Structures are given as structure tokens and as C-alpha cells.
């Protein structure tokens, strides 16, 4: 079955202005996804890694990409196709609480 990487973006302000019943349903949805085997987690502090010409590893704290909303979390999901992946993530906290979820098809060798 195809795999997809999801990236959830959202901030506290959007979360707080979402009705508690909607947030609770979204968290219950995430719990069901996790119970079904979805690998999901909250985003920690990123570290950039560079090793130009394989000569010297350099690291820098912080994200390389920027977004109006902070990255909130990641998941690896399996779905029959993109439409099913959209259906799976459309009820997650970032999607319902004024954030956004990106879905990236994972192309495996």
C-alpha cells in the first residue's frame, strides 16, 4: 500500500479559537489513526545538517524552511491513494484548527 508523509502546521491561536468539541474529535481521530498503526509525532526542535563535498559536517539549530505557521507534527500513513490520504488527515487537529496539513507521497525504491 502506498505511504505518505504528512506535515501538520498550526499555532496555538488557531487551536484556541477552534471549538473544544471539534478539537476533542480531532484528537480522538488521531488516537484512532495511531491505534491503527500510523507513526505520528509532535515536531521537536530541528537541526540543519550540511556536508558539502563530504568534506566537513556542519550543523545549525533551527529550520531551513519557513512558514507563516510553525510545524506542529509529522506522520507516516498508508493509504490506497491520495484521496484516501486526504480523507485520513482532513480530521486531524492541524486540519480542523485553522492550520494546514501537507501530504507528500513517499516514493520507495
Image (spheres, rainbow, N blue to C red):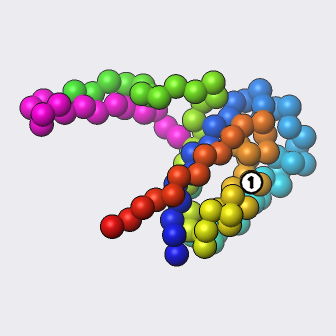
Q: Residue at x 56, y 63 (%)?
A: 77
Residue 39 place in picture, x, y as percent: 53, 60
Is 37 situated left or right of 49 in this image?
A: right
Q: Considering only vertical position in the picture, is 40 above or below 60?
A: below
Left or right of 41: which side holds 68? right
Residue 84 colored in magenta in the image:
no
Q: Is residue 1 above or below residue 100?
A: below
Q: Is residue 57 visible?
A: no
Task: In the rendered view, tell whether residue 1 sits above or below residue 57.
Answer: below
Residue 53 lies in magenta, yes or no?
Answer: yes
Q: Which residues are magenta?
A: 43-57
Image location (x, y in percent) of residue 15: 78, 35
* Residue pictured at 68% horizontal, 35% vertical: 10
**Residue 22 location, x and y as percent?**
87, 48
Q: Which residue is mark 1?
A: 90
Q: State which quadrant residue 54 falls in.
A: top left
Amino acid at each position: 500500500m502506498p505511504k505518505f508523509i504528512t506535515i501538520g502546521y498550526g499555532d496555538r491561536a488557531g487551536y484556541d479559537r477552534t471549538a473544544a468539541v471539534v478539537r476533542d474529535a480531532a484528537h480522538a481521530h488521531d488516537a484512532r489513526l495511531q491505534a491503527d498503526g500510523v507513526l505520528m509525532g509532535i515536531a521537536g526542535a530541528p537541526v540543519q545538517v550540511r556536508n558539502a563535498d563530504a568534506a566537513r559536517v556542519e550543523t545549525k539549530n533551527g529550520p531551513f524552511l519557513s512558514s507563516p505557521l510553525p510545524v506542529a507534527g509529522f506522520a507516516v500513513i498508508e493509504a490506497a491513494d491520495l484521496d484516501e490520504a486526504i480523507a485520513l488527515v482532513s480530521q486531524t487537529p492541524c486540519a480542523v484548527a485553522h492550520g494546514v496539513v501537507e501530504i507528500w507521497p513517499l516514493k520507495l525504491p
